[in-house]
């Protein structure tokens, strides 16, 4: 019995650590508006009033940033869910697993089966689970927003026209075809990020097209939710590049819903997170949240 009790205790302790997120401390992040004026999470959430979609742009291994996202979501639900439908939209799940996600939210399947069947990211338990569980507790919709990776890979290898050969069912997991071209500003930014290497340049247009498929599909997923839920608000999480400076997914969303009101929050870690660097950070979002790069990173 002592052995069993000890084993059970160890399991429970491990369970706590597996599902834990770093605690949020004011000492490890700073909030600024688009021009670098100091702000606060409460001010960010106050700006959600009347907004249709909030983009929370992240660096995927930013543990502090994920804690910030959770606090933003918590405050947003407290302020707005009593009077509006609030949906949580995630880049981290692909559209073909929406049924699995819905089954878990409805309590039909176990979390173990949900995680394995939904192809959850390696850092799901520490970084995204708290938001999904909060949405589950509040009975909110969670949107598996992204394009299936296998189809994104098709485009990066063979170009956007390769998608035309997919079945009707498969095409339902993507933005309507043909999906939109990236804006000139986004294309320029993407190509600068990829760098001058011969390997990157060789198939760069196809890679850019695959990136745009991600952006367009996430935008279409959000737009579909707004269409079905009048006066709703969506909090959407994606890698910051997808929404910085209102480009990428934001641009595609406004093509689908031109009157949508959007707020962009860009979260990134910096060694000197106390200082807003005008050259680097101006207009990355309506708000820019800098986190302490010296803190341990999430493990994907």
Image: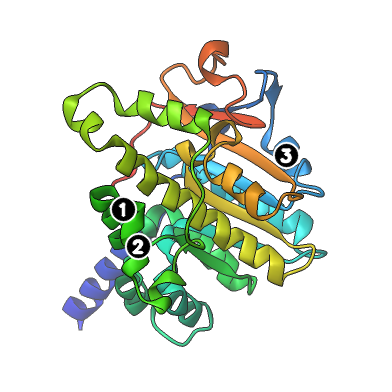
Q: Residue 42 — which label?
A: 3
User: Mark 1 and mark 2: span between their CA atoms?
Assistant: 7 Å
Q: Is residue 192 left or right of 255 when viewed as pictured? A: left
Disc nearer the start of the sequence (1/3): 3
Residue name at image x 41 percent, y 60 percent: 147
Q: Position of residue 33 (x, y in %)?
A: 68, 26
Instruction: Say what secondary structure mark 2 lies in.
Output: helix
- Mark 1 and mark 3 in contact? Answer it, CB < 8 Å: no
Quarter of the image holding residue 275?
Answer: top right
User: Mark 1 and mark 3: span between their CA atoms?
Assistant: 41 Å
- Mark 1 and mark 2 in contact? Answer it, CB < 8 Å: yes
Disc nearer the start of the sequence (1/2): 1
Instruction: Say what secondary structure mark 3 lies in.
Output: helix
Q: Where is residue 100 in the image (x, y as percent from the top left)?
A: 42, 78
Q: Residue 163 — which label?
A: 2
Q: Position of residue 104 (x, y in %)?
A: 46, 79
Q: Nearer the viewer, residue 91 or 247?
A: 247
Residue name at image x 39 percent, y 82 percent: 110
- Mark 3 and mark 2 in contact? Answer it, CB < 8 Å: no
Residue labelled with disc 1: 155
């Amino acid at each position: 019995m002592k052995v069993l009790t000890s084993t059970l205790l160890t399991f429970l302790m491990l369970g706590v650590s597996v599902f834990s997120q770093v605690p949020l401390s004011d000492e490890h992040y700073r909030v600024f508006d688009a021009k670098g004026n100091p702000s606060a999470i409460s001010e960010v959430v106050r700006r959600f009033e009347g907004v249709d979609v909030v983009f929370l742009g992240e660096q995927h291994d930013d543990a502090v940033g994920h804690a910030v996202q959770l606090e933003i979501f918590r405050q947003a639900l407290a302020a707005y869910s009593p009077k509006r439908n609030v949906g949580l939209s995630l880049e981290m799940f692909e559209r073909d697993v929406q049924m699995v996600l819905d089954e878990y939210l409805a309590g039909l399947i176990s979390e173990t089966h949900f995680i394995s069947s939904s192809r959850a990211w390696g850092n799901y338990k520490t970084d995204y689970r708290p938001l999904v569980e909060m949405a589950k507790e509040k009975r909110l919709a969670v949107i598996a927003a992204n394009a299936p990776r296998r189809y994104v890979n098709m485009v990066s290898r063979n170009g956007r026209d390769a998608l035309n050969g997919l079945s009707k069912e498969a095409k339902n997991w993507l933005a309507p075809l043909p999906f939109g071209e990236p804006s000139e500003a986004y294309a320029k930014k993407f190509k600068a990020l990829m760098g001058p290497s011969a390997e990157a340049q060789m198939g760069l247009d196809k890679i850019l097209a695959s990136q745009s498929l991600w952006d367009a599909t996430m935008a279409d997923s959000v737009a579909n939710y707004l269409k079905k839920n009048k006066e709703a608000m969506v909090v959407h999480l994606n890698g910051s590049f997808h929404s910085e400076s209102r480009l990428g997914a934001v641009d595609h969303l406004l093509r689908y819903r031109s009157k949508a009101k959007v707020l962009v929050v860009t979260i990134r870690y910096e060694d000197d997170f106390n200082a807003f660097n005008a050259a680097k950070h101006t207009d990355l979002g309506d708000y820019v949240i800098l986190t302490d790069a010296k803190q341990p990173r999430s493990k994907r």
